[in-house]
């Protein structure tokens, strides 16, 4: 079963660091809300298993003035794609 | 999946220290609610959640209910084991003899398995 992990806290909360340890093949990450601040500095990122897709919700990037400094490893998605991603995975895990 | 089987497997990932916020208590409430409805609960403690399973907590000193005592009583609801992430334990310089008797150490692979086989995963 694949999971879509949503990260809603800024890098200081280290939710992605904790989550990264448990990623399996086919899992993906979606940065939401304050989770989008991960994209501001490459040093924020933990090592992710090769091939892990990372998405970010475009609206949350725009709202925070981050749309221009987005990390190349983050694929920006809109709400429609968010819904699609939710359906493509067996479950959603919000890693708090 | 057998549609007549109403049992669902749920993994709870407790990541918060016990008394500083409401998260740990919330997670505990979810575990009891799920267990009462006869769901399979994998209760896993990692990161700062490790502090919830420390033995000899006496929260009367801060006018609270001791977390450890409540966790020990979970057996009554069918939650016999409390799983503890061994890496989180090591990182906090703690060992099993400082933890509640019913804890069982698990590694990353075991936790990944719990997550993958569960219908619902909740981190708190």
Image (tube, coloured by chain):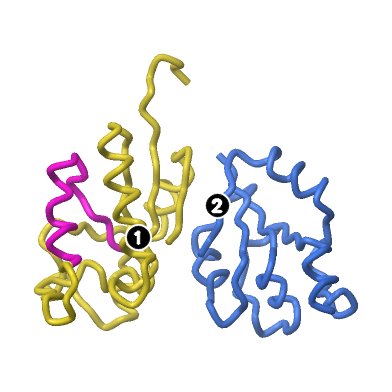
Chain colours: A blue, B yellow
Question: How far across and down, in percent of the image, does residue A86 sit?
Answer: 68, 43
Residue lying furthest right: A68
Nearer the observer, B11 or B22? B22
Q: Residue at x 39, y 32 (%)?
A: B8
User: Dot 2 falls on which chain?
Assistant: A
Rendered image quadrant of residue B100: bottom left
Residue A17 at x, y = what percent? 54, 72
Crowd tier of the residue under label 2, counting other residues whose Cα lies within 10 Å: few below 14, some 14–19, many 20 or above = some
Nearest to the observer: residue A32 or residue A30? A32
Residue holding disc 2: A93
Q: Residue at x 75, y 44 (%)?
A: A83
Name the foreground residue: B63 vs B41. Answer: B63
How many residues crowd mark 1 within 10 Å: few (<14), some (14–19), many (20+)? few
Q: Is residue A74 left or right of residue B84?
A: right
Range shown magenta: B67-84
Q: Are marks 2 and 1 on the same chain?
A: no
Q: Residue most toward the front?
A: B63
Q: Residue at left 61%, top 72%?
A: A47
Q: Secondary structure at mark 2?
A: strand
Give the image quarter of residue B79. Answer: top left
The chain under label 1 reads: B
Mark 2 vs mark 1, foreground winner is 2
Q: Can you name the residue that lies furthest to the top here?
A: B4
In the displayed structure, does residue B53 sit left or right of residue B92?
Answer: left
Residue located at (52% from left, 64% from top): A19
Mark 1, residue position: B107
Q: Taking A80 as reference, is B4 left or right?
A: left
Residue A90 x %, y %: 60, 38
SS assignment for the magenta stretch, majority: helix
Q: What whole-number distance in Å separates the C-alpha atoms at marks 2 and 1?
A: 20 Å
């Amino acid at each position: 079963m694949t999971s879509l992990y949503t990260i809603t806290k800024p890098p200081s909360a280290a939710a992605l660091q904790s989550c990264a340890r448990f990623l399996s093949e086919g899992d993906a990450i979606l940065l939401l809300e304050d989770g989008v601040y991960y994209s501001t500095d490459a040093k924020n990122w933990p090592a992710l298993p090769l091939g892990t897709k990372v998405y970010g919700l475009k609206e949350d990037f725009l709202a925070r003035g981050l749309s221009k400094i987005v990390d190349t490893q983050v694929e920006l998605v809109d709400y429609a794609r968010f819904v699609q991603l939710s359906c493509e995975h067996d479950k959603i895990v919000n890693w708090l | 999946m057998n549609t007549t089987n109403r049992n669902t497997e749920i993994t709870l990932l407790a990541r918060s220290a016990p008394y500083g916020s409401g998260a740990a208590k919330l997670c505990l409430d979810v575990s009891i609610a799920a267990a009462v409805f006869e769901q399979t609960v994998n209760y896993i403690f990692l990161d700062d959640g490790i502090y919830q399973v420390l033995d000899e907590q006496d929260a009367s000193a801060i006018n609270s209910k001791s977390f450890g005592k409540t966790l020990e009583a979970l057996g009554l609801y069918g939650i016999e084991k409390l799983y503890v992430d061994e890496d989180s334990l090591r990182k906090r310089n703690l060992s099993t003899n400082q933890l509640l008797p019913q804890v069982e150490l698990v590694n990353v692979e075991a936790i990944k398995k719990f997550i993958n086989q569960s219908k619902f995963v909740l981190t708190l």
